[in-house]
Image: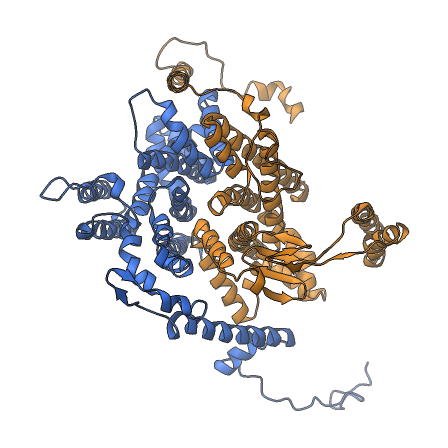
């Protein structure tokens, strides 16, 4: 090693070739090169997908807008849907939605009173938005909910303040969907908390009852419970006593939602460190003080995102009442195309109804994602 | 742990045994009182409902018991896996229903897992277009009720042209409002043996792969499994088929008069139900797979890259086995959901157990028995899937010291 001098160039090793400047790492071209044309495989995928997307978009725009028919002529009172039938498969017939939108949204509610269910829907949305703002997460929610739900009841039924009375059989459409999901969840939530606490209780009999309830309900489909509510429930009651169909379905949905929510709440109770339970006991708090002041506030906070996901699931599941013939949004949509003149335009109606569900569920899921980010902020660095 | 229980120091460390005191201040007395109260209340409600039911059944002259199962059903069923005539008994009709449910649920679980895994991996793709498209699919499919999706698919399938103008996307495949017609072969005894050989081949391959892996653990040399596997899985059935005379008569669907003859039929009801269930559940499975893959530490990817593995290999050999531990429990509940959601078949007229039991209870008027049958069937299926998935989960769980 000693005969090597520092000044002599290492023999055999050529000098490094001059290198070009590195590839641009910023800017749209660099972004595309990295994310769309990263490799041969990626380039092929991009080209195929781009071709398909362009073709589908053009096809969809042609069907939904360019070739669509927005209204049909009338002969007396009868809509002439022949022009729609001629364009079937080529252009959408939005005329069916234009003609039937009141029916799809509000069902058979008296036509001149439609402002009432419309206002009810707005009130429900307002209630959701209000409850979603974290600043109002305190006792103020209780009177707001009670007052809003009372106003909703007055608006739907009427009979006071000069509003004509509307019997429940004539309610339908979007308000029914919102009523079933809101009341179902509002009633199922306290039930779920009780069952979740019962399932973790040290008392064997209570624990067994709760396990039995949760596992039985979760093992059967919602339809079987709805069938039970519609055909079996009347047999359970004493003679002469009758509960109307909507309320029976509401009970079934509440019981169903309760079992699923109970499992979500239980997950929160289990995730809470034991130290919290022990510290609360060490302070000498009673069981209910411990649960209400220490355990539940923390446990529920842990499971807010899965809770919202369960809410989304139940909002969608209320559509199952179609099978026992309750007039919710989906049933109204399905009934709207029974009329011979409009038969065969199911796709247009289902797309519209699907869009309404999509708006509600998408808003909830975006909210849940934002909330999750917000609540986990202290964990991120 | 068991040895420490006999250790006198640890036994004495527990709280001292206190004698029972008949007082509200004693926690144990309170617990007993509360339990007696709650159980008593539940029993009282159940007894009240039971008494009402018995009374109502008497007043309405509704028969009870499962005697109707042996009577003639008289209900026509469109598609059956076992032979069935309307003159058969209710029991046989209900069995057909259970088999139809199992058929759609089994096939649905298989296809939804494949589609969901593909979409989940696509969402993590480095290709921006692919990942955004997969994200859009998941977001839309999960935010629209399944029942609406089923009605939508069924409407589209019913809107297809009649058999005479049916679409013909591939040779001998016909798509019309009567369903899909696929070519098949005339199935004989030789084909059953071939199928059996195929299954035997798969089982033998699994054992072979296991033996090879044991050898690799012993000397560190990787061995190729696929040549022998290919021979066992494809060669063995082919040999059996050839030995039995290689019967092969294609059964092609063809238009005769107003309808098709030959081939196998996929009814529009079954097709719409399967399509709806698979696309819907795949949206949820995709999210589970994505979360599972993301849960694997980034260091695992980097270490595998440093070992010189390719991206596909890393995913298959390093990441997925670890992700499975996170994926399997929520996947179980998706399988259960799919099975329970298959009951929505009643809305589009596919005759599954709910649909047939519903017709039965309408014909006989025995609502309680009909619903009890539905619930019993689903509870059994749910329990079986849970048990199997729990066994699988325990098998792949991390072995901790």
Look at the image and tell me whether residue B371 can be seen. Answer: no
Q: Residue at x 54, y 68 (%)?
A: B130
- The quarter of the picture where the N terminus of chain B appears is top right
Across and down, in percent, residue B183 comes to: 69, 58
Q: Quadrant of residue A247?
A: top left
Name the spot of residue B65 as percent of width and height, x first.
52, 20
> In this figure, which colouring scheme has been used for the structure?
by chain
The residue under the point 79% across, 56% down is B249
- B217 left or right, relative to B107: right
Quadrant occupied by the C terminus of chain B: top right
Q: Using the image as rendered, state which of residue B370 and residue A51 is in the foreground.
A: B370
Q: Nearer the viewer, residue A253 or A167?
A: A167
> Which chain is drawn using orange?
B
Q: How many marks?
A: 0
> Residue A294 occupies which quadrant of the picture?
top left
Residue B213 to residue A35: above or below:
above
Q: Colour of chain A?
A: blue
Whole-percent x, y for residue A95 in the image: 32, 64
Q: Is B83 left or right of A370, judged from the image as shown?
A: right
Q: Position of residue A5 (x, y in %)?
A: 77, 87
Please say if A143 is above or below B283.
Answer: above
Question: Can residue A238 be seen here?
Answer: yes
């Amino acid at each position: 090693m000693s005969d090597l001098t520092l000044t002599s160039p290492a023999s055999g090793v050529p000098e490094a070739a001059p290198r070009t400047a590195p590839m641009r790492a910023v800017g749209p071209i660099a972004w595309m090169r990295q994310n769309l044309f990263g490799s041969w495989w990626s380039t092929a995928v991009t080209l195929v997908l781009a071709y398909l997307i362009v073709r589908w978009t053009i096809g969809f725009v042609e069907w939904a807008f360019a070739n669509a028919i927005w209204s049909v002529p009338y002969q007396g009172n009868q809509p002439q849907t022949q022009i729609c039938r001629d364009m079937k498969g080529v252009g959408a017939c939005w005329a069916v939605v234009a003609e039937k939108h009141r029916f799809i949204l509000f069902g058979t509610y008296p036509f001149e009173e439609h402002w009432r269910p419309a206002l009810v829907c707005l009130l429900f949305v307002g209630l959701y938005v209000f409850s979603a703002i974290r600043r109002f997460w305190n006792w103020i929610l209780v009177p707001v909910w009670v007052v809003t739900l009372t106003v909703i009841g007055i608006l739907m039924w009427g009979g006071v303040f000069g509003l004509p009375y509307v019997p429940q059989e004539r309610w339908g459409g979007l308000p029914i969907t919102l009523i079933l999901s809101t009341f179902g969840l509002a009633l199922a939530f306290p039930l779920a908390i009780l069952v979740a606490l019962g399932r973790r209780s040290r008392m064997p009999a209570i624990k067994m009852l709760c396990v039995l309830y949760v596992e039985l309900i979760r093992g059967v489909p919602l339809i079987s419970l709805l069938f039970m509510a519609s055909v079996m429930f009347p047999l359970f009651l004493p003679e002469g006593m009758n509960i109307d169909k909507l309320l029976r379905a509401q009970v079934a949905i509440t019981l169903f939602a309760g079992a699923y929510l109970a499992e979500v709440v239980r997950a929160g109770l289990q995730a809470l460190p034991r130290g919290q339970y022990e510290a609360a006991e060490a302070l000498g708090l009673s069981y209910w003080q411990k649960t209400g002041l220490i355990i539940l506030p923390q446990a529920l906070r842990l499971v807010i995102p899965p809770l919202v996901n369960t809410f989304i699931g139940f909002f969608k599941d209320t559509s199952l009442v179609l099978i026992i013939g309750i007039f919710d949004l989906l049933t109204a949509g399905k009934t709207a195309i029974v009329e011979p003149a409009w038969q065969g335009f199911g796709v247009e109606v289902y797309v519209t109804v699907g869009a309404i569900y999509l708006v509600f569920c998408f808003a909830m899921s975006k909210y849940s994602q934002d909330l999750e980010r917000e609540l986990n902020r202290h964990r991120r660095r | 742990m068991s040895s420490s229980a006999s250790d006198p120091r640890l036994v004495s460390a527990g709280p001292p045994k206190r004698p029972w005191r008949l007082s509200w201040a004693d926690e144990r007395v309170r617990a007993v009182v509360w339990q007696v109260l709650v159980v008593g209340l539940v029993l009282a409600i159940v007894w009240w409902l039971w008494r009402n039911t018995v009374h109502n059944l008497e007043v309405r002259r509704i028969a009870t018991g499962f005697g109707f199962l042996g009577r003639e059903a008289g209900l026509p069923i469109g598609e059956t896996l076992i032979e069935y005539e309307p003159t058969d008994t209710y029991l046989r009709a209900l069995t057909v229903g259970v088999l139809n449910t199992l058929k759609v649920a089994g096939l649905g679980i298989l296809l939804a897992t494949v589609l969901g895994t593909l979409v989940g991996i696509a969402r993590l793709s480095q290709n921006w277009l692919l990942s955004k498209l997969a994200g859009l699919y998941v977001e839309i499919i999960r935010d629209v009720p399944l029942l609406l999706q089923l009605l939508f698919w069924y409407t589209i399938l019913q809107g297809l042209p009649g058999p005479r103008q049916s679409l013909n996307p591939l040779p001998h495949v016909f798509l019309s409002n009567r369903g899909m017609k696929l070519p098949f072969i005339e199935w004989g005894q030789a084909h059953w043996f071939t199928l059996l050989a195929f299954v035997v081949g798969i089982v033998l391959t699994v054992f072979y792969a296991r033996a090879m892996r044991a050898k690799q653990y012993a000397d560190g040399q990787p061995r190729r499994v696929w040549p022998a596997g290919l021979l066992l899985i494809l060669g063995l059935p082919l040999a059996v088929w050839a030995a039995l005379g290689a019967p092969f008569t294609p059964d092609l669907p063809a238009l005769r008069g107003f309808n098709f003859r030959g081939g196998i039929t996929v009814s529009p009801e079954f097709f719409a139900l399967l399509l709806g269930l698979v696309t819907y559940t795949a949206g949820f499975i995709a999210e589970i797979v994505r979360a599972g893959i993301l849960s694997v530490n980034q260091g695992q990817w980097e270490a595998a890259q440093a070992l010189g593995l390719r991206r596909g290999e890393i995913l298959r050999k390093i990441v997925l086995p670890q992700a499975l531990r996170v994926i399997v429990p929520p996947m179980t509940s998706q399988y259960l959901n799919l099975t329970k959601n298959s009951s929505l078949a009643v809305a589009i007229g596919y005759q599954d157990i709910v649909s047939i039991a519903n017709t039965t209870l309408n014909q006989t008027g025995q609502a309680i028995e009909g619903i009890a049958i539905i619930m019993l069937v689903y509870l059994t299926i749910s329990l079986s899937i849970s048990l199997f998935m729990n066994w699988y989960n325990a098998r792949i769980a991390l072995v901790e010291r």
